[in-house]
Amino acid sequence: MDTKPPLIWLNVMIFSLSFALAALVAPWYGWQFGYGWEHLFWLLACFSFCNLSITVGYHRLWSHKAFEAHWLVRLLCALGGAFALQNSALHWSSDHRVHHKFVDQNDKDPYSAKRGFWYSHIGWMLRHYNQATYADYTNCRDLQKDKIVMWQHKYYLPLAVTMNIGVPLLLGWWYQDIIGMVLVIGAVRLVLNHHTTFFINSLAHIWGKQPYTDKNTARDNGILAFFTFGEGYHNYHHIFENDYRNGIQWWHYDPTKWLIKACSWLGLAKKLRVAPAIKIEKARAEMRLKYAQAKLCHQHQRIFIHLQQEFDSFVEVLHDYYDLKKQLLESKANSAIQNYERSLLKTRYQQVKIRLQEQKQRWYQLTKQYAY
Ligand SMILES: [Zn+2]
Ligand SMILES: [Zn+2]
């Protein structure tokens, strides 16, 4: 007997129709009549606008409160989110907060990766699996105070229709190719938006490394980050979810982070939250120890103990360093502290900084062969 919940026909229709138009009709039309630079330009522009509205707005701003945004940013994200056709920001954030809270728990996580690729990618939206979580938005009381969130939630349907039909029609009228623009900006853009976002729930919980935590299935993956505007650093994100960054190194591809930072320079975003550096360092070092010890068998007791000792001294210096850094910062703000005391503190800080660099280098060298 089939015990699966009933299908959500509207979603089934939207996903299959847009996919058929994008994968079959759009290439056929292009082959018959050709596309111009304007099709490609607007495809990239609208695709980026929609995806960034989801990553900047729906995800890091509304779901995680990783920063505060000017109304203009919130309005643009609300419009782009409706264009991306991923439900209202309130609904999306409610689901996403449940995902973080109960990650990988099949009965609670709305898109648990433990239920397989298909389910976490798209299957969870095709049937009435999660009706209970849709009933209210009690986990988003804070968002219910945001006028733009509530306006978008109330008028989601007309907004989604206006953006998804209105924008392609407008471009089609402007460039005198209504069918071409409807296919490229309507269908191809929507399918790309959908699946690149869905990859974060599916592939980013399956494929990649776990440098910060193995308490859940989330993975860090630079390739996925490229297609998801930086959201591929999902292992980091699941442990430090309120950080406005997902890729924390300067060389990590995270355009969402860059855009939020740029907005802060323009006065359009403020109170950008970052996880304490010491916690990040410790989480990474702990995982290295865990991987190394898991790979060593009992005959290597000596190395096992040595690794533990090295880890302990690394963490000790780490604490010394951040303590001194804090003291130094405080001393700069405190005029009662004498200059010579401050310079003494500075010297100690410089010494610990060098010790930390050495210790860190030794630790990562030592655990290199066991990593991940
Ligand atoms: Zn996740
Ligand atoms: Zn998240």
Image (cartoon, grey):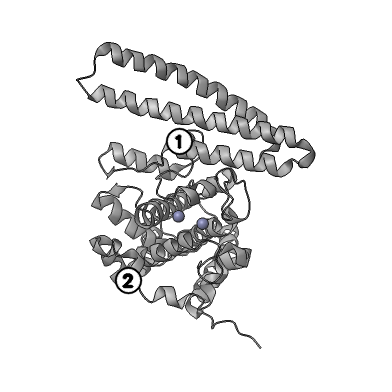
Q: Residue furthest right?
A: 299
Return the x and y of residue 42 as percentages of the image width and height: 43, 51
The residue labelled by disc 1 is 278
Amino acid on which the number 1 mark rests in the picture: Ile
Q: Residue furthest bottom?
A: 1
Q: Residue at x 24, y 52 (%)?
A: 71
Q: Nearer the viewer, residue 52 or 129?
A: 129
Q: Residue at x 19, y 20 (%)?
A: 336
Q: Residue at x 56, y 57 (%)?
A: 199
Q: Is residue 182 above or below residue 302?
A: below
Crowd band around label 1 with a 10 angstrom C-alpha radius: few (<14), some (14–19), many (20+): some
Could you tell me which secondary element the residue under label 2 belongs to?
Answer: helix
Position of the N terminus, as image quadrant, is: bottom right
Q: Is residue 200 above or below residue 289?
A: below
Crowd band around label 2 with a 10 angstrom C-alpha radius: few (<14), some (14–19), many (20+): few
The residue labelled by disc 2 is 158
Q: Is mark 1 within 8 Å of ligand 2?
A: no
Kindly tell me whether residue 232 is visible in this rendering.
Answer: no
Q: Nearer the viewer, residue 198 or 65?
A: 65
130 relative position to 223: left or right: left
Q: Residue at x 25, y 49 (%)?
A: 70
Residue 312, by quadrant, is: top right
